[in-house]
Image: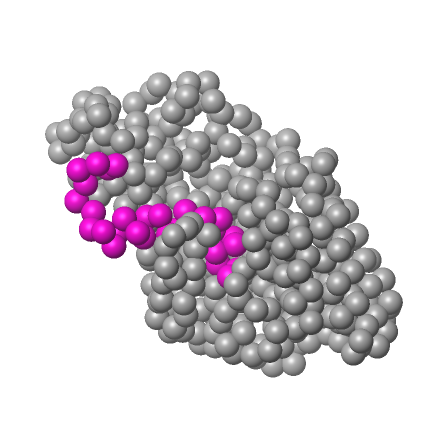
Amino acid sequence: MVSKFTTRLVIVALSLGVLMPSVAAADEVTDWSQVLGSALLATNTSPQASGRIAAMMHAAVFDAVNGIDPRYTPYFVTDDAPRRASRRAAAVQAAYVILSTLFSPSTMVPAQGPGLLRQRDASIAAIRASDRAVDAGIAWGQLVADKLLAERSDDGFPAGGVPDTGSNGVGEWRPEVAGTAAVTPWLAVLTPFAMGEVDHFRPAGPPALDSVAYASDFNEVKSLGRATGSSRTPEQTVIAFFWIDNTFSHWNRIAISVAQERRTTLLQNARLFALLNIAMADAGIAVWDAKFEFRFWRPFTAIPLAGTDANLLTEADPLWRPLLPTPNHQEYPSGHGGLSGAAARVLARVFGDRTTFTHRTDTAPYAPRTHRSFSAAADEANNSRIYGGIHFRSAVLAGRIIGDKVGRLVTEELMLPLYGGDHHDD
């Protein structure tokens, strides 16, 4: 059933010129996950910045909903909530406060305040028609969001980290435009949401340039990932483009569709989306830590300069170009591999890996794709980076391992049931 809020939200979105997802929301948690996705799309927010926003919003929503009638351990806020407060109103207010603060002129993304306020007011109006203690819920959601915002106010965003403008050393990352710094160095040092020591998740590093493993990676992407004259199939080309939208928005859409099919409750959804987005955010932090540690070169550099790598199994192609534009940051490990690995692990833990679902991309005009498991979707996301010519196989595999480890940590240590189990075995 389409909620009253969703109907009003679509009207508001159309008036703002915002593209709303086609999936009808089931409750305030999934409604506001879609609000977040639309804001990220409208502002063209990078996946790196998206992670912090999504994790903060959904962590606040979880603590707001769970705190009124606790069924799980809290994420951060342990204050006593008014027991009869509206959980729906608390969820809306917590989400609104986080988003209206983070999508403001003082941050890295354009202001969205007026549109978010109209969406918040439409949501609260719909709740008042059928729920009691709305004002108490609003006050509690406000308190939770304020506490989380204060906690994250000095987490390293957006000025943390050391800029990396690249190097001309063999095997070392260099930007396409000389002197351009790698994006978002702050993410490499951002305070994690769940992890302890970030370097605990740091991989061993890319294969040595003179190794057989490196040559295998090199020749695979050289053949499959080139813009013209590649060995890609038409299907592989579609896959390359299908996965280039915002990774956080993509996996949240998947979660919304499965949650709706399973008819999960408001509290179950609050927990699901908090686990999902915290895991992806922390996987991004661990990936960026490793990127700035290893500083490995991208295929667009490595293939034209193969004559310098001392590997007899690689051959230079000065004219080689990738199918997709290469992001302006280091090669190893893959951010998409890390985020997709974390998302697949969380969703598999909650729903069971062998779950069939259909999902779409914001990249027109590609049709939706269907997968029979979350791990299969993550595998395809990994392959998409090779088909696009922007990553070596070792980078996506290392990212996937990071994401899997972070996803396991988050689901095993955060928001645990107070009264018995709540997980599928996978």
Q: Is residue 228 left or right of residue 114?
A: left
Closer to us: 371 or 270: 371
Residue 316 shown in magenta: no
Tell me the colour scheme of the image: one colour
Residue 251 shown in magenta: yes
Rendered image quadrant of residue 61: bottom right
Whether residue 61 is visible = yes
Residue at the image position 55 percent from the left and 39 percent from the top = 187
Quadrant of the rendering where the N terminus is positioned: bottom right
The image position of residue 44, as x and y in percent, is 55, 42
Rendered image quadrant of residue 132: bottom right
Q: Is residue 271 left or right of residue 401?
A: right
The image position of residue 372, as x and y in percent, is 35, 70
Closer to us: 227 or 345: 227
Residue at the image position 54 percent from the left and 74 percent from the top = 260
Q: How many marks?
A: 0
Quadrant of the rendering where the C terminus is positioned: bottom left
The residue most toward the left is 312
Residue range corresponding to the magenta coloring: 226-253
The image position of residue 379, as x and y in percent, is 33, 57
Whether residue 77 is visible = no
Is 160 above or below relative to 136?
above
The image position of residue 106, as x and y in percent, is 72, 35
Is 204 above or below relative to 349?
above
Rendered image quadrant of residue 45: top right
Residue at the image position 35 percent from the left and 18 percent from the top = 168
Closer to us: 412 or 271: 271
